[in-house]
Image (tube, grey):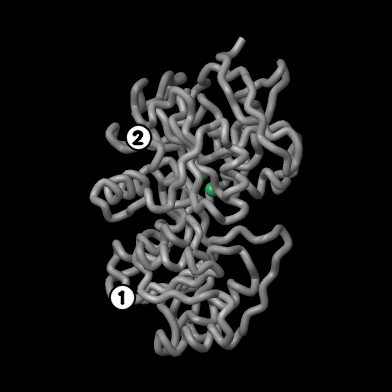
Amino acid sequence: MGLPVRAALLQAVSGPFVIDEVELDAPRAGELRVRVAASGICHTDLAYRAGAGRFPLPAVLGHEGAGVVEAVGEGVTGFVPGDAVVLSYFSCRACSTCAGGHPAYCEHGYAGNFSGSRPDGSFPMRWRGAPVRSSFFHQSSFATHVLAHQHNAVKVDGSAPLDLVAPLGCGFQTGAGAVLEAFRLQAGQQLAVFGAGAVGLAAIMAARVAGAATVIAVDLSAERLELARELGATDTFLADEPGLTKTLLKRTRGGVDFALECVGSPQVLRQAFEVTRPLGTCGLLGLPGRDAEVALSMTALLMGRRLVGILEGNADPKAFIPKLVALHAQGRFPLEKLRRPYDFEAINDAVHDMETRTAIKPVLRMPGGGTT
Ligand SMILES: [Zn+2]
Ligand SMILES: [Zn+2]
């Protein structure tokens, strides 16, 4: 008999989440039981709700959890009950990719994050007596309590507001990490960001932190561009403006040092690549459709330009998330401007508002989670 907790179950592709009681295992070796205070909703949750996982339902999604450690399993080091944690993506911390400092591309990343089960194939939650997919990103944070692994839990300052810092686990880390970790953008350089959602806006905030001279934001929404400007964009453009590529090349005198695609569209990736200067780098952050392909000018590529896919900002959450928490505490990473809070029970409203682009970063507050 496991611990009775509440979780939002997805029972059918594109269906609503239904909150019900599930049973949660005791923590196994390496695991932590976390009482979830809050969880962000990320586009990957929406993609999996729409069937991207192709795994049997029901499932518990959610991968931007934050909360307090309640119990630890065998062999856990560095965490004790009472610790505040932000939960991020799972990596094994041992394969050659992890050892090389790139845990986002861990050899066990798929099994640990996207299978819906633990890496060994087991499930931490049961619903009506049957196991359910409940280890999404080794957390499934749309629940009041979860089992995370010590490898994807990040201890943060106890005074950090958990319902603000929860999305640092994925979306905000992705955008900020691309600029600060993958690009290592230097003061005085130029950045163009295509798509001013949570990821793109986090990249813009990070570019300001790094001292970028020019930060261009491109989006279809004038309202989002207004916010981009408030967060550090120096120039904003509507995505459907005719002749935009030419305009951007003129404005940047031949192209930007770094461009970021945060939409997942072949056309946008091509445009981002085209406004990158020779020797510049274009990064892909957006989640494309499974079979998406892109056509690029090989001559343009030959001019020293680089095109790189970036997962989770190429950041190691154990080091990077505390850095972002500290920047937020200094007022230099104003997450509150992107976050819209919802009660856990209103999860379907939060999903609707995200899909209709009225909310940038919905964060669910769990009952009894200690947030205000
Ligand atoms: Zn690994
Ligand atoms: Zn995510």
Q: Which callout, 2 or 1, points at the residue further toward the start of the chain?
A: 2
Q: In the rendered view of the protein, which quadrant contains the N terminus?
A: top right
| Residue 34 x, y percent position in the rendering | 45, 26
Q: Is residue 171 above or below residue 268?
A: above
User: Which dot marks residue 213?
Assistant: 1
| Residue 194 x, y percent position in the rendering | 51, 69
Looking at the image, residue 174 sits to the left or right of residue 109; the answer is left
Amino acid marked by disc 2: Lys
Looking at the image, residue 208 sits to the left or right of residue 7; the answer is left
Q: Is residue 264 above or below residue 151?
A: below
Q: In the orientation shown, which residue stands out farthest toward the top?
A: 1
Bin the neighbour count of mark 1 within 10 Å (Cα to Cα): few under 14, some 14-19, many 20 and up. Answer: some
Looking at the image, residue 243 sits to the left or right of residue 14; the answer is left
User: Residue at 75% across / 42% down in the picture?
Assistant: 13
User: Residue at 43% across / 52% down in the picture?
Assistant: 338
Residue 164 or residue 44, whichever sits in front = 164
Q: Is residue 26 above or below residue 107?
A: above
Residue 97 or residue 139, whichever sits in front = 139
Q: Secondary structure at mark 1?
A: loop
The residue identified by callout 2 is 155
